[in-house]
Image (tube, rainbow, N blue to C red):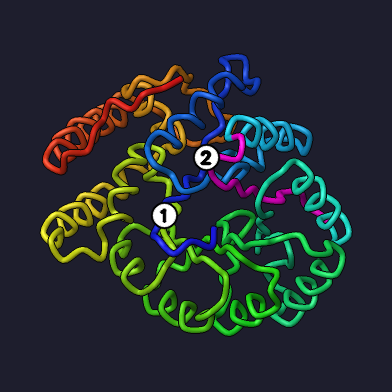
Amino acid sequence: MKQKEKGFIPVMLTPYLENGEIDFDGLRQLTEFYISAGASGLFANCQSSEMFELSAEESLRVIRAVVEQVDERIPVVAASSVKGNIAVQADFVRQVYSLGVDAVILITGLIAAEDESDAVFEERIFELFELTENIPLGFYECPEPYKRVLHPDQLGRFVASGRIIYHKDTCLDIKQIQSKLAQVKNHDFGLYDAYMVHAVESLKAGAAGLSCIQGNYFPELIVWLCQHCNDPGFSEQMASVQQFLTDNMDVMHHVYPIVAKYFLQKRGLNISLYSRRKAGNFDAQVKLAIDKLYKDYTILAKQLDIPTDIALS
């Protein structure tokens, strides 16, 4: 998580069987897919994983399966997704960490209610620090149950404590990203941006990498972006990739995560389209849009010499 080279941390999907049960064979295959694509780490039990549609026990089973499949090849982080007071959340943090993850990610919208102040939020964070001993932690500005975005000075104080090593940022504001990065200089910490409209700008500003849903379509493209962002010899290609991501933002978010699972089916993964989330209607028009995205990506990948036939085991 605290790497010098730019890296991609996928927000993992949860595959299901058609009866709605978790597809652990599919999850293991998906884990290998991300690793084969060059992911620097994995974020299990996140919003893309449908964490709020999983029971606490199911979340722990999913995290355990990912950790076991990875087998220490790359870092794994996972969210603490239970609701409740700080004592309840601290207990779940300990349970998640016991599974072997490298850090447990706190959902900012679960720490304090939307109408509660920043002071209350910060007080509870430091209380949680005390209750979780020296467990490495991170933050995720998840849109559910509501999005609580950290202010740059807040993030700076938390990182200065030595407990926060990871942050998945969803503020959608490049100037705020730059301010946050300025606050955390010289700390063992990585900020990973989720917003692909300013992906290149964020990487150039000092973000440790990217953690975005686009990696659930073509993770190798996001890895390529991280690897070449500071190479002036690739400036033209970088602009082309940035435009491709920006142009297809709405397509990839509509009826998500079903559309991502359909895209991965087209790529050869044996997973169903089943989702517990009420994502919308996956109709013929949506399918055609994803078919076009697949075709356009295939052309772009060929232009960039990015292999699309990722080996799966």
Q: Nearer the viewer, mark 1 or mark 2?
A: 1
The correct choice, above or below, for 120 with respect to 259 in the image is below
Q: Image height check: is 278 above or below 91?
A: above
Q: Is the Cβ of the residue at disc 1 closer than 8 Å to that at disc 2? A: no
- Residue 12: assigned label: 2
Residues at marks 1 and 2, CA–CA distance in whole angstroms: 15 Å
The residue depicted at 59 percent of the width and 81 percent of the height is 156
Of residue 114 and residue 182, the one placed in the foreground of this image is: 182
Query: How far across and how far down the image is residue 51, in percent?
Result: 64, 41
As for residue 13 lying within the magenta part, the answer is no
Q: Which mark is residue 162?
A: none
Q: Secondary structure at mark 1?
A: strand
Residue drawn at (62%, 49%), measured in percent from left and top?
77
Residue 214: % across, % down: 37, 45
Image quadrant in which you'd find residue 286? top left
Give the residue type at disc 1. Gly
Within 10 Å of the Cα at label 2, are there few (<14), some (14-19), or many (20+) other Cα atoms? many
Residue 34, percent across and down? Answer: 44, 36
**Is 308 in front, or is 100?**
100
Looking at the image, tell me whether mark 1 or mark 2 is earlier in sequence order: 1
Q: Of helix, strand and loop, which mostly describes the magenta segment?
A: loop
The quadrant of the rendering that contains the N terminus is bottom right
In the image, taking residue 249 as reference, residue 92 lies left or right, namely right
User: Does the magenta run of residues contain 79?
Assistant: yes
Q: Label 1 crowding class (10 Å Cα cut-off): few <14, some 14-19, many 20+?
A: many
Label 2 amino acid? Met
Number of the label disc, if any, that sits on residue 7: 1
The region drawn magenta spans 71-84
Q: Residue at x 41, y 38 (%)?
A: 216
Q: Is residue 144 left or right of residue 186?
A: right
